[in-house]
Amino acid sequence: MDTQVIVVGAGPAGMMLAGELRLAGVDVVVLEKLARRTGESRGLGFTARTMEVFDQRGLLARFGDIEVSNQGHFGGLPIDFAVLDGAHQAAKTIPQSRTETVLEEWVTSLGADVRRSHELLSVKDAGDHVEAEVRGPDGVHRLTAPYLVGCDGGRSLVRKQAGFEFPGTASTMEMFLADVKGLNLPPRMIGETLPGGMVMVGPLPDGITRLIVCERGTPPQRRETPPSYDEVAAAWKRLTGDDIGHGEPVWVSSFGDATRQATHYRQGRILLAGDSAHIHLPAGGQGMNTSIQDAVNLGWKLAAVALGRMDETFLDTYHNERHPVGQRLLMNTRAQGLLFLSGAEVQPLRDVFSELIRYEPVSRHLAAMVSGLEIHYAVDGGAHPLLGRRMPHLELTGTTSPGSSTEALHGGRGVLLDLADNAELRRRASGWTDRVDVVTAAPKELPGDGALDGTAAVLVRPDGYVAWAAPGSHSDLPMALERWFGPAR
């Protein structure tokens, strides 16, 4: 075999997955057909959950100063995200180009083999390995590995070659996205609904303005090249009456409202993550964030299988956990599209939603949905409120390092938090310390929601979700450790 895992695509999902695999010591080759990063901003910012994920890997400092905000929306209707409980707010103006730069620097520092100007031509599951035909600078060659993951976007060649089903609905309209210099437009951060459609304006660094133009009645086109800025300016003038033709475009793109999801995220030795597995209207900036979280869920599981610690069937938990997340993503983006992009016939529905959002439980529910904080995985049964949910940030005392539950996850390993200094607990976990870090400490302060009141110990998966807690889990600690980390050594 040439490597243990082949990752196709060097976007945020592919880079995050490569980093997760390298943290576990898995050899990985990343194939990317582009010779260099595009530099296009595309996805902007991070949801609160992605901020947590990056913090759990010690990556936030690499982004420098991050502008955060509690102001958000659902389908263009304002929501105050301050109703959510969490250590982080959403980041608003980090361009995808910066995210890709940070992640690539991280994965290369970990030893990932990133091969640019390497285009996948075909892929085949040969039963006991995967074969990839690749065109690189030195010609066409073949790569083999036990596993391959398609992170190659909405038009994924991996998905098509491997025969994944990708049902859903086709685009009904074409919309424009552009980053432009030389414009002085008032911000429309959550968009403005107009008689003919919707426009959005957001200021970016370096005097750049992000525009989104959605004109109802524009049929979708399958373009081989990006639209011209003249098309964007013409649509803007039809909708707003304003002339922005003097602007200097940095880049221009188009997108639609197609909604599709792979029926399975895994077929044999080939898996999908990110836009390869799901495409949708980019409402609320959820796409890149969900893709990154797909990669974090898959990375440690694929590593455990590739290293021989877990049976291949363990990979089914990736589909079982992330496919429902993708379904809810498609559901909420379609709902937002109806609210945001429809005409006057939907105004009564907007009015009803506006009334409902004034109730905190409703605004909390919608904010958690689009922030990724509502996710609840099915783990071994029990009554503890955190089972299957993300581990809250805890500042720890009684240990010099790590200083928090978040810092404890920097290495991408499982973490057993012994909050009651229980020597017997540590003895029972001793057979897994090659892959699970045992941290004996006490929380400086418990979360205000009472979720950790009376808790003596918590087992946290590498992706930051709670797999076991005491008291409150039906299984005992060794059973949970074996379920998620394999047999004791």
Image (spheres, rainbow, N blue to C red):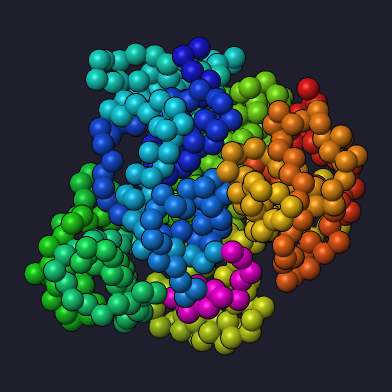
What range is drawn magenta here?
A: 74-87
Q: Position of residue 166 (x, y in %)?
A: 50, 42
Q: Residue 144: within the magenta?
A: no
Image: 424 above or below 351 = above
Q: Position of residue 370 (x, y in %)?
A: 54, 64
Image: 316 above or below 223 = above
Residue farthest toward the left in the current orientation of the protein: 246
Figure quadrant of residue 65: bottom left
Q: Position of residue 168 (x, y in %)?
A: 50, 50
For image coordinates 38% across by 56% down, the residue present is 64
For image coordinates 9% across by 69% down, the residue present is 246
242 or 384, which is in the foreground? 384
| Residue 323 seen by the camera | no
Left or right of residue 153, residue 224 in this image: left
| Residue 138 seen by the camera | yes
Q: Position of residue 335 (x, y in %)?
A: 52, 68
Q: Residue 80: within the magenta?
A: yes
**Quadrant where the C terminus lies?**
top right
Left or right of residue 368, residue 202 in this image: left
Image: 278 above or below 203 = above
